[in-house]
Amino acid sequence: MLREPAAKRYAQAAFELAREKGDLDAWQRDLGTLATALQAPGAAVFLASRQVPDEAKQDALRRIIGEPAPLVWNLLRLLTERNRLPLLPQIIEAYQSLVDEERGIAHAQVITAVPVSDEERSAIARRLSELTGKQVQVEAHQDPEILGGLVARIGDQLIDGSTRTKLTALKRQLEGSTR
């Protein structure tokens, strides 16, 4: 998906307001509710449609999140008036990233050759936390092509401890020594 720079600016402004007012959790709750609702079939199309009046969009948003924090509601009205509601999923994602950064939380995508148990997932999270100095939340995926070990991606950082990579490196080393 193509990222809109405007979404990051809206998220940054929302984050700074929420932090200033001490409302990070309220914003996170309301935006989380919206994120869940936007996954419903047709929700994003409805909010993006120029044929749907702004009042109908705002009524739908109000039904989804009930009585949001006042500044959250102001953001939603502003996005509606500027026809920027389609940016909402990206704004929510960027806001969550800013909150996680503020709280020292990192998200790791971990690939292993075999499924990992909850105990192994916790051990991986502890080790990655030691390496990064952050509280790491692990999302594990399986890919038998890595043969063994694991590959972890935390933001832009890649930690490749897979057996496949080690075997490839060993092969290169052996080829280099025979020449």
Image (tube, rainbow, N blue to C red):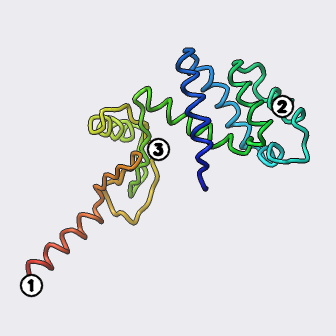
Q: Quadrant of residue 16?
A: top right
Residue 128: percent from the left, percent from the top? 32, 40
Of the pair 47 and 141, the residue shown nearer to us? 47
Query: Where is mark 2, residue-wise?
Result: 58
Cα separation, mark 3 vs mark 1, equals 43 Å
Nearest to N terminus: mark 3 or mark 2: 2
Callout 3 touching callout 1 (CB < 8 Å): no
Query: Where is mark 1, residue-wise?
Result: 179
Residue 145: percent from the left, percent from the top? 39, 66
Which circle, 3 or 1, is nearer the viewer? 1
Residue 107: percent from the left, percent from the top? 44, 40
Nearest to N terminus: mark 2 or mark 1: 2
Nearest to N terminus: mark 3 or mark 1: 3
Q: Is residue 13 left or right of residue 143?
A: right
Callout 3: SS = strand
Q: Quadrant of residue 131?
A: top left
The residue at the point 42 percent across, 44 percent down is 108
Cα separation, mark 2 vs mark 1, equals 71 Å
Vertical comparison of 29 with 132: above or below: above
Q: Quadrant of the C terminus?
A: bottom left
Tag 1: Cα neighbours inside 10 Å, few (<14), some, or many (≥20)?
few
Cα separation, mark 3 vs mark 2, equals 34 Å
Callout 1: SS = loop
Q: Mark 2: which amino acid?
A: Gln
Q: Mark 3: which amino acid?
A: Glu
Residue 88: percent from the left, percent from the top? 68, 40
The residue at the point 84 percent across, 45 percent down is 46
Residue at the bottom extreme of this rendering:
179
Tag 2: Cα neighbours inside 10 Å, few (<14), some, or many (≥20)?
some
Query: Where is mark 3, residue-wise?
Result: 139
Q: Mark 1: which amino acid?
A: Arg
Callout 2: SS = helix
